[in-house]
Amino acid sequence: MFNVQDIRKDFPILSRKVNGKSLVYFDNAATSQTPQQVIDAIIDYYANYNANIHRGVHTLSQEATDLYEQARQKIQAHFNAKFSHEIILTSGTTDSINLVANGFSSLLKKGDEIIVSALEHHSNIVPWQMLCERTGASLKVIPMNEEGELVITDFDNLLSKNTKLVFVNHISNALGTINPIKYIIDKAHQVGAAVLIDGAQACPHIKPDVQALDVDFYVASAHKMCGPTGVGMLYGKEDWLNKLPPYQGGGEMIAEVTFEKTTYADLPHKFEAGTPNIAGGIVFGAAIDYMNRIGFDAIAAYENDLLNYATEKLLAIDGLKIYGTSKNKTSVISFNLEDIHPYDVGTILDKLGIAVRTGHHCAQPIMDFYCIPGTVRASFSFYNTKEEIDTLVEGVKKAKMMLS
Ligand code: PMP
């Protein structure tokens, strides 16, 4: 049974004060907070198992290796991948995307086309621009509309036999829009293109099924899912991961090395050069366990309630405009107060102990679309409450009074 007050007890940081006020943490889309169970898993690893993995005969190394590989299996089960070797542990979403972009350098040529969307985070734009520079391929963009949704008929028109790759985020970090990824995947496959879905913002709210989606690549970061920073995942279909060349060279990713020739290890190790973030990988598994114990259906229902409550209360403030008004969205509200700079609003809210994000949210093309420098973004998680939203609303009113 979902009980937010019980859940809040799991998060020590939620009881701290900021600027003399109780912390109200609404920057969840940037990084989620960490429950005690996950903090305990970090301590347990360093207190009891710390050793390098995959190469030791001694007991600690074997135990750490087992825990690391068990975490990979948990991630496999969570995303419903067919094989655990289709899960590559990376340093995060950005790293996962760059791994794939790098791999496609040898598979693309001039005349090939890559499609991205107008709603992307910079980490799902820049690596593809760099890939285009390396290969001569060109980048096409699915446009967005005023509601912050993709204009999907334009996507249909962009597809052609030249389309080799399509990259779209599952959920926009700046606006919260949930994109129609199943439609995009199926359409892209009809012209033989591969699809990478950036799930960084989706995974804190929903549980994706990569086999049901039939997606080629899916990426996420642990730190947005109650896990630690510096670790994330890349799911890739086995055939694709076998086709892509290694990303980085080094220890762990080889089968045999001589000065004449090196052969590479099998999946997943081919893409995991060097000592990985061992504690991070293991604790990513603990974070997934934690979220699954709460349950993604309960999380989605509760957060949706928070979203509706906050939307109504904020819209009642004269001069407040919300960007991203799709009916299909998660618990992110991007807004501006008249023509007051978002940074000024954020600074006053911080003085009141309220953490929001201000700026372009690494999605400058979205801000350009709306002709604004940025927004104030309040993003809610399952451990937030309606009382905290009331505090935000009062804070925004105060900011308006002081800055108008
Ligand atoms: N894509 C999206 C949609 C994101 O929201 C983020 C994080 N803000 C990223 C990619 C990058 O994630 P990371 O910084 O963890 O690599």
Image (tube, rainbow, N blue to C red):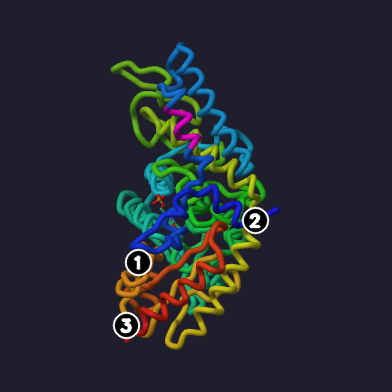
Residue 245, compared with residue 401, is above or below; it is above
Is 43 on the left or on the right of 381, as rendered?
Answer: left
Q: 10 Å neighbourhood of mark 2: few (<14), some, or many (≥20)?
A: few
Disc 2 secondary structure class: loop
Is residue 364 in the magenta section? no
- Residue tagged by mark 1? 350
Q: Is mark 1 within 8 Å of ligand 1?
A: no
Distance (Cα) linking label 2 and label 1: 27 Å
Mark 2 and mark 3 lie on one chain; the one further toward the N terminus is 2
Name the image quarter holding the C terminus.
Answer: bottom left
Residue 398, compared with residue 130, is above or below; it is below
Q: Which of 385 and 245 lies nearest the eye of the viewer?
A: 385
- Residue at image point 51% right, 20% down: 63
Q: Is residue 216 visible?
A: yes
Query: What is the quadrant of residue 24 in the picture?
Result: bottom left
Discs 2, 1 touching: Cβ within 8 Å: no
Distance (Cα) linking label 1 and label 3: 14 Å
Query: What is the quadrant of residue 259 in the picture?
Result: top left
Overall secondary structure of the magenta stretch? helix
- Residue tagged by mark 3? 402
| Rendering coords of residue 18 (x, y %) | 36, 60
Magenta range is: 40-46
Among all residues in the image, which is located at the extreme front? 20
Mark 2 and mark 1 lie on one chain; the one further toward the N terminus is 2
Residue 221, compared with residue 251, is above or below; it is below
Mark 1 and mark 3 lie on one chain; the one further toward the N terminus is 1
- Residue tagged by mark 2? 3
Residue 301, compared with residue 402, is above or below; it is above
